[in-house]
Image: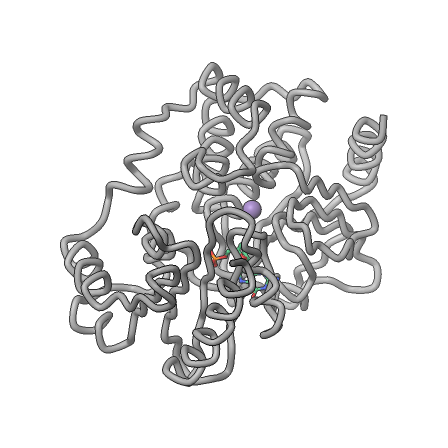
Amino acid sequence: MKLMADYKNIRDMIDESNSILITSHYSGDGDAVGSQLAMFNYLKQLGKNVEIYDEGEISFQYKFLPGFSNIKDISEATGENKFDLAIVLDSSNLDRIGKVKELLDSQTKIINIDHHPDDDHFGDLNLVVQSASSTAEILTQMFFDIGFEIDKDTATVLYAAILTDTGRFRYESTGRRTMELAGLLIERGAAPRKICDSIYFANSPGMTRLTGKVLNNAEFIADGKVCMLEITNQLLKEYDCNLEDFVGMAAYTLTTKDAVVGALFKELPGGKTEVSLRSKNILNVSNVAHLYGGGGHCNAAGFVVDMQLKDIRLKVMDNLKGLVNASV
Ligand code: 5GP
Ligand code: MN
């Protein structure tokens, strides 16, 4: 079986390495953070020298996860960091890890574990399972298959990762196996209510008010089939909020009955804009993200462009109108 062969090769590559780097895509989401912390616990249990380095701010929502302080920002890396092996999680290509790439040299072997359909198999070993809801689901399956004793902390970080990457067990990617594995993680100590509340019911008053403001400014086009939201710098300042804390806002673009496609625009420093795209049913928003150098899944994709918010918003509006009109 291919999976078993991959597990064995992964273990061999780990055994042959003294110093191991774990990383994921910049501005890690729940899957990135949880998967990295779970892999960290596994490697520590094997007695390995292991470090986690990431680029970009991470939402406050994941900072309660056990072991979070083991994640270091790339700015803390010194020239002395040398790694025999890099385990890259939840990243469809190597550019997604940003500056962490500078920690790799020609000697560093790469294990790529991911579930994105547009993963480009950049690793020396690629465990890419498109049917998995999340990278954490791939890891959970692997840990059970190889008999790694999942403790409460590891169960917690894996459960949080699966919870967030399935949109709370809501996306199409949520299969029977996803639920079964989540159940096994609960059996190992993951606490569903506590984890869910720590992520989704822990806003500051400013965040709740800002959310209201953003929703109040929602724009509906194409007979309400497309919904667009935006978070500007000015709003963030006004409500004393951090941009990275609004990872969940994109989901609001689809809360209206007729809305089948949504876009959330976030103003970044330096005249850049981050765009999150969401869709219901078979409308593929990753095709739109690819037009701007981004990527993702059929129903959730994104990209960052070097353009002012209002300019990219007009372009994406046309793309999304085209997408819904082509589907009728
Ligand atoms: P989000 O909108 O939550 O940031 O991202 C939604 C999905 O699109 C995630 O699967 C994420 O990995 C992917 N994604 C977001 N931005 C980019 C990007 O710039 N490049 C690629 N390849 N994927 C992206
Ligand atoms: Mn993921």
Q: Is residue 127 left or right of residue 198?
A: right
Location of residue 240 by image quarter: bottom left
Q: Position of residue 328 (x, y in %)?
A: 51, 58
Q: Quadrant of the N terminus?
A: top right
**Which residue is rendered at x = 62% and y = 68% of the image?**
290
Q: Position of residue 278 (x, y in %)?
A: 46, 56
Quarter for ligand 1?
bottom right
Front-most of residues 284 and 239: 284
Total numbered badges shown on the rendered structure:
0
**Which residue is rendered at x = 78% and y = 31% of the image?**
7
Q: Is residue 270 above or below residue 117?
A: below
Front-most of residues 74 and 142: 142
Q: Is residue 88 left or right of residue 243?
A: right
Considering every residue shown, the one lying at the far top of the view is 187
Front-most of residues 49 and 156: 156
**Which residue is rendered at x = 50% and y = 65% of the image?**
325
Identify the colour scheme used.
one colour
Q: Is residue 14 above or below residue 29?
A: above
Considering every residue shown, the one lying at the far front of the view is 328
**Which residue is rendered at x = 18% and y = 54% of the image?**
208
Q: Position of residue 284 (x, y in %)?
A: 57, 56
Location of residue 95 by image quarter: bottom right
Q: Position of residue 63 (x, y in %)?
A: 37, 46
Q: Is residue 21 above or below residue 183?
A: below
